[in-house]
């Protein structure tokens, strides 16, 4: 029998039991749909995290205050800062392949302007003029303050879009004055909109001033909350990170390491670890669904072989070979699983779109996984359909014709 005729016969057999064929394919539909939906949600979440990490800037290395011991009590990272201006001077002078550095001081305070008041969600940041370059953050208006402002503890500020909207809803903020703890700061620039960060906080809700002004006028502190560094190239990041670590360790002169150096890749890996683990877990459950669907196909095909024993006997008696019978039943199993896989792909994509529409979650449907899922569904049909097909091919024609 020609291959095309075998397919026609297989389709007729499936069409005779439409409901049973549909219920048999349901396992594949659920399995493939679950795989597509899971991978789409996981890939979308990963892409969103990577985009948000990229918004931190290119080739960024961050030095955080690390854990330390005091009187036998261990404190976690960020509980105390020993990052000093001398550390920044040493890093600038001795570490190669640095394209920008910004000591960062953080603090919270109400800002007042134009008869209005507002407390920025991101707080008041003390930074260097390199900050927009390190963060890959352009200015929508005005300009960044300069080194002269840093040296003179200048009372100048750059604000985010949210702060501008809250304090200057109907006018240009450039050249206006805002007050931080009753100290007037002239607004010299406005940052371009950047959106929300990894923690769901509004990055545009921020006021940036020279770090020296922050330390002497606002917070009265002598250490930094963190230090941002931009490496010249991506391939320089590991070398810069190691050099910074070695230099700071050397400067501590045997004291316990009280800082942590992280690069952009490590931050991204940490941020995506949870979504990656969840994707693997849900993907494993979806794969189990595919296997269960395959077992269902094998079970139904065995029932079909039993029901069609006389038909098989007649075919063998009039000259059909065992391989023809095997091929027919195997094609039936593959068609059933493939159609289930095809419907499952559509169901998975549709579910992903619904999640995006109703819950505003990021979804990215990868073509690669669509192909893999559909191909795997066909493979399941071959694997789980082979035994019933082989059993049908081994039937004795005489015994099959006697079967009632």
Image (cartoon, helix red, strand yellow):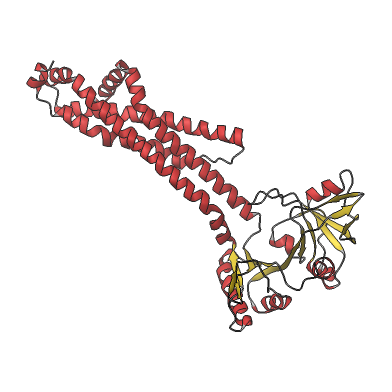
The residue at the far left in this view is 398
Q: Quadrant of the C terminus?
A: top left
Q: Where residue 185 sits in the image (x, y, percent)?
A: 88, 61
Q: Residue at x 88, y 58 (%)?
A: 179
* Image position of 316 (left or right of 21): left
Q: Quadrant of the N terminus?
A: top left
Q: Where residue 390 sits in the image (x, y, percent)?
A: 18, 31
How many numbered marks appear? 0
* Image position of 236 (left or right of 167): left
Q: Residue at x 13, y 20 (%)?
A: 313
Task: For residue 318, say whether it is visible.
Answer: no
Q: Which residue is more in the foreground, 23 or 382?
A: 23
* Image position of 167 (left or right of 14): right
Q: Where residue 152 sits in the image (x, y, percent)?
A: 86, 72
Q: Which residue is more in the foreground, 105 or 400?
A: 105
- The image quarter containing residue 243 is bottom right
The residue at the far bottom in this view is 253
Q: Is residue 231 above or below residue 301?
A: below
Q: Is residue 99 above or below residue 382?
A: below
Q: Residue at x 66, y 51 (%)?
A: 197
* Image position of 107 (left or right of 181): left
- The image quarter containing residue 334 is top left
Task: For residue 295, say whether it is visible.
Answer: yes
Q: Where residue 315 sits in the image (x, y, percent)?
A: 15, 19
- The image quarter containing residue 88 is bottom right
């Amino acid at each position: 029998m020609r291959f095309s005729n075998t397919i026609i016969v297989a389709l007729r057999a499936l069409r005779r039991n439409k409901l049973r064929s549909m219920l048999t394919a349901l396992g594949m539909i659920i399995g493939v749909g679950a795989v597509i939906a899971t991978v789409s949600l996981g890939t979308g979440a990963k892409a969103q995290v990577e985009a948000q990490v990229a918004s931190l800037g290119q080739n960024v290395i961050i030095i955080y205050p690390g854990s330390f011991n005091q009187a036998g009590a261990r404190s976690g990272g960020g509980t105390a800062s020993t990052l000093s201006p001398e550390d920044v001077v040493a890093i600038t002078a001795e570490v190669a392949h640095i394209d920008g550095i910004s000591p960062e001081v953080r603090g919270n305070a109400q800002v007042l302007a134009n008869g209005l008041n507002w407390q920025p969600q991101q707080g008041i940041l003390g930074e260097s003029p390199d900050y927009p370059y390190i963060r890959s953050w352009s200015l929508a208006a005005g300009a960044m303050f300069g080194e002269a402002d840093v040296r003179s503890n200048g009372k100048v500020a750059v604000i985010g879009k949210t702060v501008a909207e809250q304090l200057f809803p109907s006018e240009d903020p450039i050249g206006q004055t805002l007050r931080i703890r009753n100290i007037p700061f002239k607004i010299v620039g406005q940052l371009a909109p950047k959106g929300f960060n990894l923690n769901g906080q509004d990055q545009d809700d921020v006021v940036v001033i020279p770090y020296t002004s922050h330390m002497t006028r606002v917070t009265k502190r002598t250490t930094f909350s963190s230090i941002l560094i931009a490496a010249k190239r991506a391939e320089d990041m590991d070398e810069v990170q190691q050099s910074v670590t070695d230099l700071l360790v050397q400067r501590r002169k045997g004291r316990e390491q009280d800082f942590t150096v992280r690069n952009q890749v490590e931050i991204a890996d940490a941020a995506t670890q949870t979504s990656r683990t969840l994707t693997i877990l849900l993907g494993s459950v979806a794969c189990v669904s595919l296997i269960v669907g395959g077992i269902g196909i094998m079970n139904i095909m065995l029932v079909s072989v039993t029901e069609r024993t006389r038909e098989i006997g007649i075919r063998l008696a009039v000259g059909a070979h065992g391989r023809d019978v095997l091929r027919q039943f195997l094609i039936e199993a593959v068609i059933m699983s493939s159609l289930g896989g095809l419907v499952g792909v559509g169901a998975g994509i549709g579910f992903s779109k619904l999640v995006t529409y109703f819950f505003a979650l990021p979804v990215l449907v990868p073509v690669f996984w669509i192909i893999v899922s559909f191909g795997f569904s066909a493979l399941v049909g071959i694997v789980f359909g082979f035994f019933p097909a082989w059993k049908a091919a081994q039937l004795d024609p005489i015994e099959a014709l006697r079967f009632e």
